[in-house]
């Protein structure tokens, strides 16, 4: 042992840290808030089974249950609950400091937490979407919805992880975005669809499934570019925000 | 009066090492409120107490030292590197915050091992064991932290903060919620670290803690550095305040008479009973000396001339508390 470099950190561009991922995952699954994740997929699959058993028109079932509930509610809510948990909860209770007092690039910390959030959200949403698509119409519809939602989970997670670093009441603001911007304005004003993750997801699902039951609301290229720009942009902002993470003083 | 800035002697590889923790003209304000006002200090190895009343700016200062707050003006450096937006400093820095939240679902061993791994230590396992032993937590290390008492939790956090053997350890109110035994153990631990050449800075608003743990203090009052150094020396420099001594002798009254003739004595009071410690006698004198230096030279001379044997001479107001109250009161 003549080498003087006792501490030899791999100085390459690390984007993922397994230690942080495992703590984040355990924290996420252990939180009471995560219990909220159980009913949403169950309701989606249950409702799909119900409409299928009543022989409702597939067109109607897809637009009300799969898009109206699945893509517009279950997906963003799941991503919101998880995305604001992985880092926002640790900021709230102060445990984030244990991770930040380490000589790790902030990018590595943020991207790890983002990946945990995105993958968990994608799994939690894609599985019931696959089942629901299959129940209502076909496997190809299910696959299209599952993949589209999984991509959507990555976009939403970036958005909500950033929000939880920027805003104290990220859950409320996220809810307002989902309900008011995407839910209300997205259906009233055609122009807002360019800035609506829900529309991108519908577009992806329609394209992938090739199903005549799903109508893509926009051009695929625009959806891909916007989803990518939104994801990368919010992550860049979030990393920078984490670099300047401040702890409030005793009197403030 | 600044504090020892001698380079750590055992570090032969770092020639003329500067002070490990350096603040230069550091201010921090929130809108119109100034929380920390133009603080300059440099700390080297040893234990230093950061002392001040609640709301004086201690935590703000510690947060800036730890890289969790940008100074509005000035620079904060640890081992020569700025702390703000510079995660590399955490190789040399350990922080124990006042907020005591820990991931309760982890055992202490998991928690400390995670710290070791995130520090990219070559042998995380060994470092974890060492840190657990240092804080005397081995018997409970495999229990979930949310089953811990406040003191145990605190020790787990300290272990996680020193698992990489940092040159600088910052602790914000580390003794809160500890029982006297735990407190003593923690003080021993901090002394050990200081003896090993580490720079330990802890904040406290409890004077007894600082007094027991460290002679060296940085006193923060209303955001400003009111005094720094050995608090006994600080006291001696406060010449505008008469110094109090409690003296007992073989003949208190004769001594009182002789002392009254002395210039440096501002007042003499005969006390009925000062039965403190070994050799206590009934009665004693409370002296107020206007000049510390002259009085301490005059006293033995007076005693010898009068044939009086001095039994005890105790500075009565050299406690940190009186120093502190003078400093706070002066503003």
Image: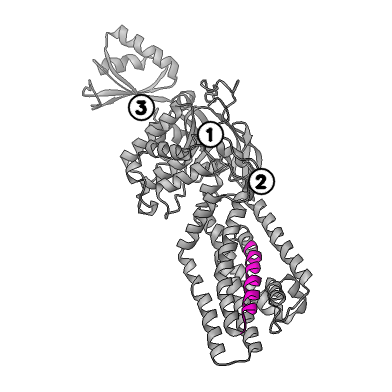
User: Please, what secondary structure does the residue beneath circle 2 have?
Assistant: loop
Question: Which colour assignment does the render follow?
Answer: one colour
The subunit letter for the residue under badge 2 reads A
Q: Position of residue A146 (x, y in %)?
A: 62, 73
- The residues colored magenta run A137-158
Q: Residue B123: image x %, image y %?
A: 48, 37
Residue B135 visible? The answer is: yes
Residues A204 and A28: in front is A204
> Can I make out residue B52 in this image?
no
Q: Decide which of B71, A192 is in the foreground and name it.
A: A192
Q: Is residue B286 above or below residue A43?
A: above
How many neighbours does mark 3 have within 10 angstroms: few (below 14), some (14-19), or many (20 or more)?
Answer: some
Q: Look at 42% across and 17% down and name the residue there.
A: B264
The quadrant holding residue A56 is: bottom right
| Residues marked 3 and 2 touching at CB (< 8 Å) | no
Distance in Å between CA atoms under marks 1 and 3: 22 Å
Identify the image quadrant of residue A221.
Answer: bottom right
Q: Chain of mark 1?
A: B
Relative height, residue A147 to residue B45 (above, below): below
What residue sits right under mark 1 in the picture?
B226
Question: Mark 1 vs mark 3: same chain?
Answer: yes
Residue A217 position in % (x across, y down): 74, 78
Q: Is residue A153 magenta?
A: yes
Q: Secondary structure at mark 3?
A: loop
- The residue tagged 3 is B316
**B1 in relation to A60, above or below:** above
What residue would you read off at disc 2?
A: A13
């Amino acid at each position: 042992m003549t080498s003087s470099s006792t501490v030899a950190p791999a100085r390459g561009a690390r984007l993922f840290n397994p230690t942080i991922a495992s703590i984040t995952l355990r924290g996420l699954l252990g939180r009471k808030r995560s219990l909220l994740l159980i009913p949403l997929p169950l309701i989606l699959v249950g409702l799909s089974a119900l409409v299928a058993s009543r022989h409702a028109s597939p067109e109607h079932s897809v637009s009300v249950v799969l898009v109206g509930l699945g893509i517009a509610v279950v997906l963003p809510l799941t991503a919101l609950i998880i995305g604001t948990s992985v880092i926002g909860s640790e900021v709230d209770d102060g445990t984030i400091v244990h991770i930040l007092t380490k000589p790790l690039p902030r990018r590595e910390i943020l991207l790890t937490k983002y990946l945990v959030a995105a993958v968990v959200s994608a799994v939690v949403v894609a599985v019931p979407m696959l089942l629901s698509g299959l129940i209502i119409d076909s496997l190809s519809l299910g696959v299209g919805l599952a993949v589209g939602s999984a991509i959507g989970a990555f976009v939403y997670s970036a958005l909500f992880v950033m929000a939880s670093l920027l805003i104290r009441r990220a859950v409320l603001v996220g809810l307002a975005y989902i309900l008011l911007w995407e839910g209300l304005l997205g259906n009233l004003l055609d122009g807002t669809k360019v800035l609506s993750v829900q529309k991108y997801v519908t577009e992806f699902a329609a394209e992938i499934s090739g199903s005549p039951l799903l109508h893509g609301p926009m051009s695929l290229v625009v959806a891909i570019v916007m989803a990518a720009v939104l994801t990368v942009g919010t992550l860049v902002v979030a990393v920078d925000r984490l670099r300047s993470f401040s702890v409030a003083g005793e009197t403030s | 009066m600044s504090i020892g800035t001698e380079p750590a002697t055992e570090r032969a590889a770092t020639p003329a090492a500067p002070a490990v923790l350096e603040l230069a003209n550091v201010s921090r304000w929130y809108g119109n409120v100034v929380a920390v006002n133009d603080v300059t200090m440099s700390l080297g190895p040893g234990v230093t107490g950061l002392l001040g009343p609640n709301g004086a700016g201690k935590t703000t200062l510690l947060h800036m030292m730890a890289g969790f707050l940008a100074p509005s003006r000035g620079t904060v450096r640890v081992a020569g590197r700025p702390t703000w937006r510079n995660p590399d400093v955490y190789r040399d820095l350990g922080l124990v915050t006042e907020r005591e939240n820990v991931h309760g679902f982890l055992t202490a061993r998991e928690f400390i091992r995670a710290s070791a791994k995130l520090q990219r230590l070559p042998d995380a396992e060994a470092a974890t064991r060492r840190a657990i032993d240092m804080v005397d937590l081995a018997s409970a290390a495999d229990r979930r932290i949310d089953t811990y008492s406040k003191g145990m939790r605190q020790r787990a956090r300290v272990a996680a903060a020193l698992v990489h053997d940092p040159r600088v350890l910052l602790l914000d109110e580390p003794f809160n919620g500890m029982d006297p035994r735990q407190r003593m153990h923690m003080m021993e631990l901090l002394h050990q670290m200081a003896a090993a050449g580490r720079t330990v800075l802890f904040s406290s608003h409890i004077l007894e803690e600082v007094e027991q743990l460290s002679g060296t203090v940085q006193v923060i009052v209303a955001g400003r550095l009111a005094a720094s150094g050995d608090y006994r020396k600080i006291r001696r420099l406060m010449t505008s305040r008469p110094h109090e001594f409690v003296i007992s002798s073989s003949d208190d009254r004769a001594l009182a008479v002789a002392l009254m003739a002395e210039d440096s004595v501002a007042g003499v009071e005969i006390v009925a009973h000062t039965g403190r410690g070994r050799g206590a006698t009934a009665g004693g004198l409370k002296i107020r000396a206007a000049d510390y230096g002259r009085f301490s030279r005059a006293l033995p001379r007076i005693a010898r001339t009068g044939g009086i044997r001095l039994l005890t001479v105790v500075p009565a107001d050299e406690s940190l508390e009186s120093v502190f109250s003078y400093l706070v009161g002066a503003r």
